[in-house]
Image (cartoon, rainbow, N blue to C red):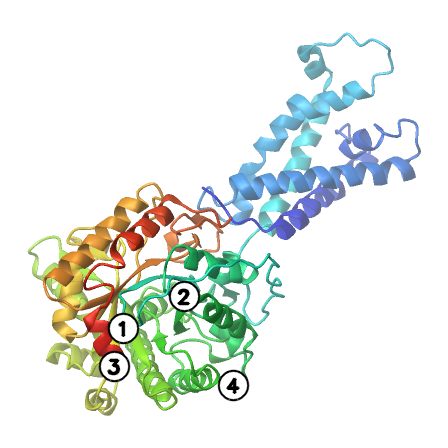
Amino acid sequence: MIRVVSFRKAALAGAAGAVAWEALLRPLLAAGLPLADLVRALGTVPAPDAPAWVWWPLGMALHVGVGVLWAIFYAYVFWSLFVWRPVIQGLAFTPVPAVLAELVMYPQLRLMHVQADVARETAWTLLQDVTWGERAGLLLGHLAFCLTLGALYTRPVGYPAGHPPRLPAPRRRAARRVRAPERAPSAFIFATGIECSYPRVEGGRWRRDQMAATGHYAHCRHDLELAAELGLTHVRYGPPLHLVMPARSRFDWSLADGPLEAMRDLGLTPIVDLCHFGLPDWLEDFQNPEVPAALTAYAAAFAGRYPWVRFYTPVNEMYVCARLSALEGLWNEQRRDERAFVTAAHHLAAANVAMMQAILARRADAVFVTSESGEFYQAATPDPEVVRVADFENERRFLPLDLVYARPVSDGMRAHLLDHGMTAEAYDGFMRREAPRRAILGVDYYEWNEKLIDTEARPQALGELFGWYVIASQYYDRYRRPMMHTETNRLDARDAPRWLWRQWHNVQLIRGAGVPVVGFTWYSLTDQVDWDIGLSQVLGNVNPVGLFDLNRDPRPVAQAYRHLVRTFADTPGLKDCPALEAILA
């Protein structure tokens, strides 16, 4: 497992652990207990006969340095290895440095203090020279060190909500002559995206910021150059809403100006995600009735500042956002009840509709990509309750899109909405609206999108059973809109090229069946952090799903995607995509 390490936190935790060791043992040593005095042993190596005011600072400096090195080792190798509380993880780490200190390091330090030209020692005699009191002191010191380390080294990624960090300046790189290939505006879309999720967790106290965790703020220009080099034409890009709109009616465009200008310079077309799983701190969460109006104001301001941007995803994956925030309790409001889900879905859909209208008022030919997770629920048994739950979830997955596209829900679902907080007036308001003509139905697909409703009527990940073709067909049959495969990746980097081709062949198959698919996306450009656990815990584990790793070195799937684009981009039906041409007209 590769991890993102916070060197600053690790260094501070290691130094604090060393200080805790000394603070615990020094009074005991002063009381005359025959414990190992590691600081004195370290300090008197460079200054054998020095007084305490000399050897103690030297010993503490060396002691703290060793503590920092152990903390970095802990952060890289041991942290998050077990799903335990941080303090317990630190305690479990104790035997690693303690055993090495007792068997190797401390005996060697004693040997350095031998006053003889020739010392006749063996490993056994060195170990015998260490007294039981010294062994107890080493164990006690390591317990203090590791408990402190475990308590302090937590949450290596993200930052406290309400206290955005000082973001790193973009790294200066030599100018590169690279541009995306020049294709007709109506050419089939080959895209990637910059993972930009920013929900809050831990009761709203901690902000997950994927752009920060993956290093995009520092590597922004380089990341976009990598997309252009692969021959891609479009990039899904979501400026961090919580930083761009830090207060009501106040905007900081610095984190949007640079990336968007870079995309123009590189010939890339942005598909702008305006809301991607999170909200500014002042808006709190998706239970807030102010969400639609606030996001509409943001969309209007964004479209006014960047009139050349044509492609938008107003709200990314509304169903997933509502479910994980309000039904499964992972993010944002972290609720687990039906009323909270209906409220969140209502606010997300209302925001999406109003944002589209605000953008169209400023750019009448704007194109909307309503990216949603392609879900499916399969009943495991013919048990009536299991079948009922599967049927209900298969209808619930469509709910936000039904509201956005003014597609009437069933009588049962309408009754469910009215029973859980949505008014009949609000529902009818959605149904009276007409969805924009230039709207592309984006359907995302991952191996966990298909779920089995087990014998206890609970969803379990099923893996790829039917695949994107079957599930996307269900969404197309419901909405009859031009489609796009807007997200996919594979957690197993070795298998990612095969997964890429499987998804592409699904696109070919559904196009051959007459469904107007206008684009394909591998998401994301770089690896992600903690998405294997849905961002629910702040561990810093790197998920190798990107076209490039976090060092910006290509993974095999990048070469496969480059080859795919070169092979198919100029073929009939893709060089000029009639369905996309009709949208753009």
Residue under pointer 1: 338
Query: Which mark lies nearer to you, 2 or 1?
Result: 2
Q: Name above or below for residue 370 compared with residue 103.
A: below
Name the N-terminal-most of marks 2 and 3: 2
Q: CA distance from mark 2 to mark 3?
A: 40 Å
Q: Where residue 63 sits: x, y (%)?
A: 75, 37
Mark sitting on residue 248: 4
Q: CA distance from mark 3 to mark 4?
A: 36 Å
Say which element carries label 4: loop
Mark sitting on residue 585: 3
Q: CA distance from mark 4 to mark 1?
A: 29 Å
- Residue drawn at point x = 41 percent, y = 71 percent: 333
Q: CA distance from mark 4 to mark 2?
A: 22 Å
Mark sitting on residue 331: 2
- Residue drawn at point x = 36 percent, y = 64 percent: 233
Other-residue count near label 4 (Cα within 10 Å), few / some / many at <14 / 14–19 / ≥20: few
